[in-house]
Amino acid sequence: MKVVVDKDKCTGCGKCREMCPKGFKIWNIGPNKKAKASNLRFCHVCTICAGVCPTKAIQVIRDREEDEKEGTNEKNL
Ligand code: SF4
Ligand code: SF4
């Protein structure tokens, strides 16, 4: 999965970091006042960040492969 920030839209407000359950583990607001998500192994893919971003700068993209794998797992349960 990926968490993509549109740098043109990001204002560096920090809402994503504030509201993300893993906040400071994932989100960095750089000196350029642009948010960047890293350490995505901590990410729950909850999409809260995308929902709270006032400028809709965040896209949480799930990999098709992961979805397919999960689908398979569900069938196997
Ligand atoms: S909430 Fe949106 S605008 Fe604010 S810092 Fe995060 S990505 Fe940037
Ligand atoms: S999807 Fe959830 S856990 Fe992942 S970065 Fe966004 S708010 Fe944080």
Image (tube, rainbow, N blue to C red):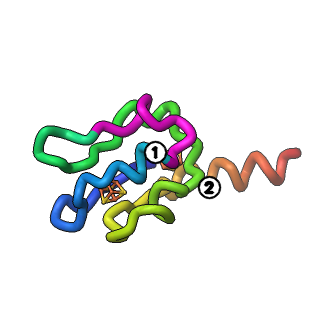
Horizontal side of 70 relative to 6 (left or right) equals right
Give above or below for 62 relative to 25: below
Horizontal side of 66 relative to 28 (left or right) equals right
Residue extent of the magenta highlight: 19-28
Name the residue beneath numbered marker 2: 68
User: Which residue is nearer to you in this view: 6 or 24?
Assistant: 24
Q: Residue furthest bottom?
A: 55
Q: At label 2, which amino acid type do we have?
A: Glu
Q: Which of the two discs, 2 and 1, labels the residue nearer the N terminus?
A: 1
Residue 48: assigned label: none
**Image position, residue 70 (x, y; %):** 68, 49
Give above or below for 75 relative to 57: above
Give the distance between the C-alpha atoms of the residues marked 2 and 1, in whole angstroms: 31 Å
Label 2 sits on a secondary structure element that is helix
Q: Is mark 1 within 8 Å of ligand 1?
A: no
Label 1 sits on a secondary structure element that is helix
Q: Residue at x 60, y 55 (%)?
A: 67
Q: Residue at x 16, y 65 (%)?
A: 8
Q: At label 1, which amino acid type do we have?
A: Glu
Give above or below for 57 relative to 45: below
**Image position, residue 62 (x, y; %):** 50, 55
Horizontal side of 50 relative to 12 (left or right) equals right
Name the residue beneath numbered marker 1: 18
**Image position, residue 19 (x, y; %):** 51, 48
